[in-house]
Image (cartoon, rainbow, N blue to C red):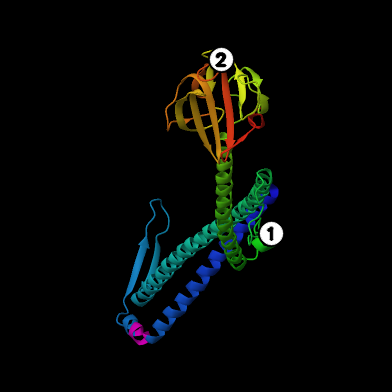
Amino acid sequence: MTKNILSRLNYYSRFLFSLMQIAAIRGYDLLISLLSRLTEHGRTIAKFLRTSRDHYTVLIVPQKKSMVRKISASSNVLRLMAVVGVIAAICFLYIFYEFLTAKKEIYELYELRKLSVAQQEQIHNMASKIGYFEQKLESLKEYEKKIRSMADMDGVKKGERESYRGVGGPIPDQERSTGSGSETAAIGQMNKSLDQLIYEASQQEKNFQEIIAFLEKRRSILARTPSIWPVEGWVTSGFGVRKSPFSFRKEFHSAIDIAARSGKEVVAPADGIVSEVERRSDMGNMVTLDHGNGITTSYAHLLKSQVHKGKNVRRGEVIGFIGSTGRSTGPHLHYSVHLNGVPVNPRKYLP
């Protein structure tokens, strides 16, 4: 507290001393100018003073009883006093005007210094924020690498730099106090840093968009891959060679039979499009879904279908009901999966 008061007193004393110096210098310049003018017009002034030699007397009469005072002066003296008084008044007014002007200029200089200090603080804060932004950008890049690794994507594109060696951070105290040159250099450096950070941020945005597109595609693939049971029940016949329940001969069974009560809902095990809705003599009422990527699933012996050809279905959506239509020994679902037209074991796609 005491140190702050002493610094303020020191500042104001130097401020007043500077004002007095400026006023004295300008007053001296004005006096020299007036004296030079008086020297130039000395004859005119002398003639003016010699035009009259009259004397004037001023009587000072007090109210109380005391002596009357008398002041006498010649007209030349009065005129000289008038000239000197006018000159003195002009000098005083000029010095006072210069004093006010100097005070205003010094006040403006003081305000500019305050503004400069505030701007230095703003530059310092901006540099700190740039440094923080660089750190966050680096952490985002590390996060991107982890996501790419988890998603089995390449960590860094060919030709892309591994990391950004940015510039920024707070301005050192010795640089902040060296003047406008260092401030200009710091601002220029921060502008370069900001330009580079904007470029890096745009590149980072593109990278995340690529990751999002990849994950969306992966999610779409997962959504279209059969992964749930189409109906709850028990498997009465598996995939592969079996004895036919009708001819009792060995045959290749390209699906699994899931027994359940008649009328129970059959749902789509994945997203897809209804490619076929038909009735066959051997398979009865049958629905076929196309899931993309060469995967199709079929549902036979249905009591009835709930969908039509061309309909988009979602995983878990009802597509029909358990029945025993066609060549069947009882209510069950004949569930088959084909990959590029080749039957595969549906068990591979079931939890």
Out of 76 and 350, give the one closest to the viewer: 350
Which label is found at residue 131?
none
Q: Identify the image quadrant of residue 94.
A: bottom left
- Is residue 45 covered in magenta? yes
- Residue drawn at (69%, 48%), measured in percent from left and top? 2
Q: Residue furthest top?
A: 261
For the magenta stretch, what is the residue range?
A: 41-46
Left or right: residue 62 compared with residue 214: left
Q: Residues within 10 Å of mark 1 (few under 14, many from 20)?
A: few
Q: Looking at the image, is 69 positioned above or below residue 280?
A: below
Q: Quadrant of the C terminus?
A: top right
SS type, badge 1? helix
Q: Looking at the image, is 314 positioned above or below residue 28?
A: above
Out of 136 and 222, give the one closest to the viewer: 222
The amino acid beneath tag 1 is Asp
- Residue drawn at (43%, 79%), measured in percent from left and top? 33
- The picture places residue 262, in percent across and down from the top left corner, at 53, 13
Q: Residues within 10 Å of mark 2 (few under 14, many from 20)?
A: many
Left or right: residue 259 compared with residue 42: right
Q: Earlier in the sequence, mark 1 or mark 2?
A: 1
Left or right: residue 251 compared with residue 288: right
Q: How many marks?
A: 2
- Is residue 141 covered in magenta? no
The overriding secondary structure of the stretch rendered in magenta is helix
Which label is found at residue 173?
1
Q: What residue is shown with label 2? A: 331
- The picture places residue 142, in percent across and down from the top left corner, at 68, 49
- Distance between the alpha carbons at the discs numbered 1 and 2: 86 Å
Q: Looking at the image, is 262 positioned above or below residue 340?
A: above
- The picture places residue 161, in percent across and down from the top left corner, at 65, 60
SS type, badge 2? loop
